[in-house]
Image (cartoon, rainbow, N blue to C red):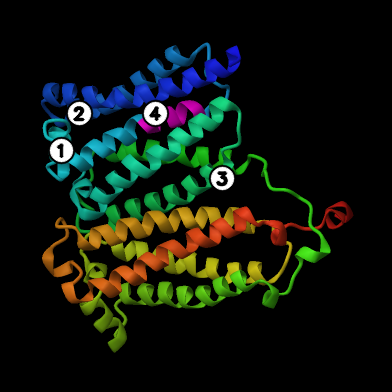
Amino acid sequence: MSASAASAASAGTGVFVLSLMSIPICYLFNSLIANSTQAFIFAGCSTVIILSIAHVMFKKKAPADPLFYVYAVYAFFSVVNLIVGLEQDNIIDGFVTFYLRQANPHINTAHGHMISYWDGCVHYLMYLLMIAAITWGDSYRAIGLYWVGSFLMRAIVYILGSTVGKHGTEVNYFLLLHMLYISVSVWACFRIFSQPSTQEDELTEAEQNSLLDRPLDLLFIIYLVPAFAFCVFRGLVVLDCSSTWCQEYTQQYEPYLKDPTAYPKVQMLVGMLYSGPYYIITLYGLMVPGCEWMPDLTLVHSGALAQAQFTHICASLHTRTPFSYRVPAGGQPVFLLVNILYALMPQALCYRCRTMPAFFLRPTRDKKTE
């Protein structure tokens, strides 16, 4: 192994070790913090300390990409979020007890609880993969776009739901730190989008087959029609549609849509306003060759839908949701089947677009003409 490769591997390992330091740090500060002011100061100072430690640890061996440091810090706080989720479920105790008492009440809702698990597991894995790619000099644009979709869905629903829901008047200082996280993450999104695509750019005439010669794409087109109808239908449900179908669906399968925290309502509205147009655009992209934006668009959307559906499914069934808003036992098979399919199909479509992108790439001669 060359010296540069060993240095890169050492930097990646250092990030992993740094993230695990959050476990003793949480336990220590949970024992020392006495009031909310100290907690706010600790949260701000810990970010500065982590950045300083990362700079010292990786000063001679870290890559030049600034997102390396961003994801190093995010990996640290992802482990903190996993600790929060585990303590909320009484699996561990004494690590973030004070934080759970004093932080924004949104963290103790079923939606906030599921966000903690998603960030502590899925986002943490993505951060480590992107850090590994950065240290080895590989492209991390694909993973980055998936994270962009997941982050955007999480941020939009969490901020709007926290503002308009029943806890909207109980916001405290921790929201300022959350807005700092949002600002840095938006900047990271633009950095990821600006990276060059690694897709091949050669397309032959044989690859411009008709839809009947592409049975897999035909299957996806058939799926997109009911998916569009489903996201619009749930949007109408949370808008208090008076239709008998909407009312019966809410009562029998998804009473969580009426939860007063407003997170499910915001999530369904975001799905109707953004996923709805996405399905129409994707229909076009699957039928007309040369839509080069399709692989990237499906990556972002699949990340967003994975985060949204995980949070929605788990929160609908979790004990932190009041019993009257949980999925009735009789409706759980249908609820799980529909929502899991709704979450998995975008992943399959994304996989198809990423692994077989030739149909979406324009012939080289067309690019030269432009």
Which numbered marker is on residue 168?
none
Quadrant for the N terminus in the image: top right
Label 3 vs label 4, nearer the camera: 3
Q: Position of residue 20 (x, y in %)?
A: 31, 26
Q: Position of residue 310 (x, y in %)?
A: 33, 56
Q: Label 2, label 1: how many angstroms apart (C-alpha)?
A: 8 Å
Ranked by sequence position, the earlier of labels 2 and 1 is 2
Q: Can the viewer see residue 263?
A: no
Instruction: Name the residue carrying label 1.
Output: 102
Ranked by sequence position, the earlier of labels 1 and 4 is 4
The answer to whether the residue labelled 2 contacts the one labelled 1, judged by CB atoms less than 8 Å apart, is yes
Ranked by sequence position, the earlier of labels 3 and 4 is 4
Q: Label 1, label 4: how many angstroms apart (C-alpha)?
A: 23 Å
Instruction: Name the residue carrying label 2.
Output: 39
Give, as a three-letter code, the residue at label 2. Ala
Which numbered marker is on residue 73?
4
Give, as a three-letter code, the residue at label 1. Gln
